[in-house]
Amino acid sequence: MLQAIIGGLTLGSVYALIALGFNLTYTTTRTLNFAQGDFVSVGAFVGLGTVGVLTAALGADAVGYVWLYALAAVAAALAMGVLGLPLYLAAIRPFAGKPGMSWVVSTIGFGIVLQSAALSVWGLGARMLPAPFGDEVFRVGEAGFRSQELVVLVLAFAILGAFDLAMRRTAIGRCMRAVALNRDAAALMGIDVPRVMAMAFLASSALAGLSGVLVAPILSASLFMGVIIALKGFSAAIIGGLTNPRGCMAGGLLIGLVESLTALWSAQWREIMVFLLVILVLAMAPNGLFGRKLVEKV
Amino acid sequence: MMEASVLRPAARRSALLRAAPTLGIGAALVALALTLSNDFYLYVAFMAGVYYICASGMNVLAGYAGQKSLGQAGLFAAGAYTVALLTTRLELPPALALAAAPLVAAAVGVLIALPSLRVKGPSLALVTLAFGLVVEKLVTEWTDLFGGAQGIYGIAPLALGDEPFALKHWVVLVIVLGVAVHLALSHLLNGRFGRALLALQSDEIAAECAGISVYRYKTLAFVLAAALCGLGGALVAQQNQYFNSDFVTFHLSVFILLLVLLGGAGNIYGPIAGAAILTMTEVFLAQWPSVQHFIYGAMLLFALYLMPTGVAGAIARVLPRRMAVLDGMETPPLTAMERGRAEPSAGPLLEVADVSKAFGGVVTADKVGLRLHAHRIHALIGPNGAGKSTLINILTGVITADSGTIRLAGQDITRGAPHARAASGIARTFQNLRLFGSMTVLDNVLIGAHARISVTGREEDAVAKAKAVLDFVGLGEHAGALAGSLPYGLQRRVELARALAGDPVLLLLDEPAAGLNPRETAELGQLIKRIGQLGIAVLMVEHDMGLVMRISDEIVVLDRGVVIAEGGPRDIQTNPRVIEAYLGREDSPAPDGPEVDKEERAC
């Protein structure tokens, strides 16, 4: 039970990271990256590649693996973050602020391009990225959990906390919130709105890439693993309330918990439960659990 | 109704004439299919047909109703597993199973519509997507029933006598079904139904107030899309005689949406273009498997940037636009037209009693009473925040009152939905224009007449009536223009025409003169007077006191949710409470008790 809760919180915090990414782009541009899953997968493989290249260049034991893993995580976040810019330019900017959901198609297209490019580099197979602190199982009473789960939990919460703080306390965070609240007013106040939007995509993609490296030691990394992770991140964002960053985080944890508690009973049914829950929540609370109701003035 | 159900010979001939090109193309395709002997090409043709059938339903949902669903794979599966289980488990005849598939899928469609109706945009995408994933996992994991990845073998195909259908027969069947679907949908979408869906996609509140039950029409769109998608799935399962869970993927859902978006959403020819192009692309790219996905992705990435309205939209823009119908059409003037309702007997047309509404602590209506009479023009005035627009919203049902009753010609409508009230004769305009901007002026007016156009009625009659309304407000020459492209003053008049088209007994105007120049305001005044002369009761919220005093028969003054004065223009101008509400009191003694209360609540 405790084990399931820790496992659930671990996965949940990864969903929360991705959900936060969705929140960033949605509030600033009213669009979402439907290719987020491919960013997660490719992020994991960039991490894998970094570890491989560095090991080959420096020799296996030149520095501790922990540092290699940390570098890999940074590299994945950077690489995916940078890729977020062409995503914004090609798939989002032409459609941002226009009615219709053309960006669904264009971002899915971007994802397919990214995925097929990655496939030609890394191939179809699944790989294992070793965990930085080994794969031993710690025991606390009845429950056993892996070191990576703790790493993910701690890192994810640190990042979520940092984002929360940054959105409230820094200039760029204020700009983003201003653009989210009222794009036109923000532009009139001298905020470079397209730049803020691009930043949002950069941050969102970086979060996705980082999530990929974080989950890779827990699940085996394949170029197809990202889709379902991102869909759960998307679910987390929506049921938490797409416009509320803290709601997105809570949504992520909730989904992770539901998933791992269902798995206690039956592993096959966990996705069914998660998505049934999503449908139910939205049928009851169309704006998500913590989303603000948008009142339309007539 | 009786008369309309018996089509006049001329109407029948014109319907046949309209169907002729489609039937001709269908026949040509059948002939072409019969000459093909290459199985690969036949299979491609079959799949293109199936894609078209799925996409045409999806076009109703995504293109017309604007509900971008990402869960169509679930409905495809519903149809496929229906034929699979019915023919293998229950050993029903294949034709019966094929007929049952769309029905089962439609029932599942209702299921998915229920939660979907409450959400919009990304949340809608997620609900439908979650539905698709649940179905995908169900058919994968529940192996006892659905066979999982092993699948279900031995699905009975259709047969000619004792011979099971050959591929060629399947192609012919798909073409016949495709043509039938196209004809049925064109009939449906190029009229009342299609207009209603486009209207609710553009603006749900305005559509609802024009008499369209947004709830019912969205559900219908979901059901249509589901049934056709289920039919597609059933055809694939029967043709293959095999179906497994690998068919049911998120990618299939995306693909079905793509067929529509790439082909041209909201264009009757869109799905045809989409199915043709995406099938071709698949076949063409299959020669280079390594780059197939890459190019496919790039296509998606740039297609809508290059062709925002899809392929069909891009083609339509190149072709010369056919300008419809209206020129030279004889229309009787509106005054002479028989009005659709009996004149209500003497006494007030609308009676509002004790209506209250509070938002949190802010009371915007406090025991408001109101009586409106046919033939008369009523003005509702009051300072900003007095609750005037709220009252209009309560009368039209956009906002539900907390308490009190509203009676229209004696009938209690307090709890009625906006579309029901519109149908019973309450029409309105909006403070901020809510036109269907990308539709023509004529279509806007036809939507206003939605509740008046019978399902079986002739489109020509509806158009003639709409034209009469346009002439009445002086917009006859702009009938074919896009509503959003007109200058502001004319747009306001289009909204008025849309409201009038519903043959209302009561017309509510929310600041009709806002943003108009003095000449336009004067014309508007004349127009409102003429509307009153038609026998319609008018209630207008207006800040232009010149206009109010000039044309009103009766004025109601509202302040902080309370009716503080009623009477003719002369009485109101001299009423001390009115002057106080607008200008404040000259000497300011301590306000009396209830006033303080209200002030506090208003804060």
Image: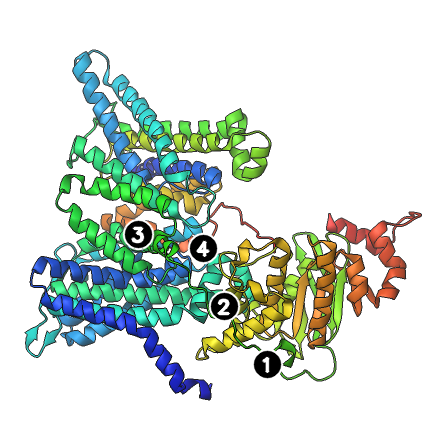
User: Which residue is more in the foreground, B512 or A13?
Assistant: B512
Disc on the earlier residue, 3 or 1 = 3
Q: Which residue is drawn at 22% across and 55% down?
A: B248
Callout 3: chain: B
Q: Which of A45 and A142 is in front in this view?
A: A45
A154 is higher (above) or lower (below) than B401: above
Looking at the image, which residue is at 26% across and 70% down?
A: B179
Mark on residue B213? Answer: 2
Q: Which of marks 4 and 1 is in front?
A: 1
Residue B119, label in figure? 4
In the depicted structure, whether residue A130 falls above or below residue B129: above
Work out how far the residue at label 4 is from the one at label 3, CA to CA, in angstroms.
21 Å
Going from N to C along the chain, the mark reached first, 2 or 3, is 2
Disc marking residue B258: 3
Q: Residues within 10 Å of mark 3 (few under 14, many from 20)?
A: many
**As drawn, is A263 to the left or to the right of B110?**
left
Check disc 2: other Cα within 10 Å, few if <14, some if 14-19, many if 20+. many
The three-letter code of the residue at mark 2 reads Ser
**B60 on left or right of B534:** left
Q: How far apart are marks 2 and 1 (CA)?
A: 21 Å
Q: Position of residue A89 (x, y in %)?
A: 38, 34
Determine if residue A108 is in view. Answer: no
Give the Cα distance between marks 2 and 3. Answer: 28 Å
In this rendering, which labeled residue sits more in front, label 2 or label 1? 1
Same chain shared by disc 4 and disc 1: yes
Q: Name the residue under label 1.
A: B340
Q: What residue type is labelled 3?
A: Leu
Task: State the residue in front, A195 or B127.
Answer: A195
Label 4: few (<14), some (14–19) or many (≥20) C-alpha neighbours in 10 Å: many
Separation of marks 3 and 1 at Cα, in angstroms: 44 Å
